[in-house]
Amino acid sequence: MEGDRNELCYRSNEYWGMRMRTDLCDLIGIDLPIIQAPMGSASCPALAAAVSNAGGLGTLALSWTKPSDVRQILHETRSLTHRPIGIILVLDWPQEDRLEIC
């Protein structure tokens, strides 16, 4: 029995890929139900793209980013991935300018 479990671990692309697929994955177009935490200044185009390219959902925390910089950050991220990414905006104050750019 132990050998069977180990075999499943070695075939993780087949086994875990099927088991980890969720309705959320289908809804937002990702392969794995892994969403990068939007860690303020630690979220950057390279990290968001790496998570998205690995099959999860990379995110960019843009609430405190000047609207004039949002377009450049999105362009840089899109140059690194064509997979879905998430944009995080805190809605305690007006975010219309940033939302329109996104």
Image (cartoon, rainbow, N blue to C red):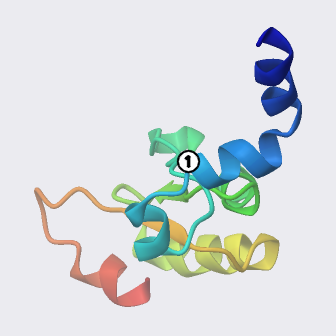
Front-most of 36 and 77? Answer: 36
Instruction: Please tell me whether mark 1 sits on a helix, a strand or a loop.
Output: loop
Mark 1 nearby-residue class (10 Å; few <14, some 14–19, many ≥20): few
In the rendered view of the protein, which quadrant contains the C terminus?
bottom left
Eyeballing the image, is 94 above or below 6? below
| Residue 75 image position (x, y, % from top left) | 67, 81
| Displayed quadrant of residue 38 | top left
Q: Nearer the viewer, residue 70 or 37?
A: 37
Residue of label 1: 20
Q: Tag 1: residue type?
A: Met
Name the side, left or right, on which 95 lies relative to 35: left
Q: Residue at x 67, y 43 (%)?
A: 16
Query: In front here: 17 or 65?
Result: 17
> Outermost residue toward the bottom?
100
Spot occupied by residue 73 in the image (x, y as percentages of width and height)? 62, 70
Q: Look at 55% across and 58% down and name the residue there.
A: 57
**Which residue is depicted at the point 75% across and 62% down?**
53
Q: How many marks?
A: 1
Which corner quadrant holds the N terminus?
top right
Residue 89 falls left or right of residue 44: left
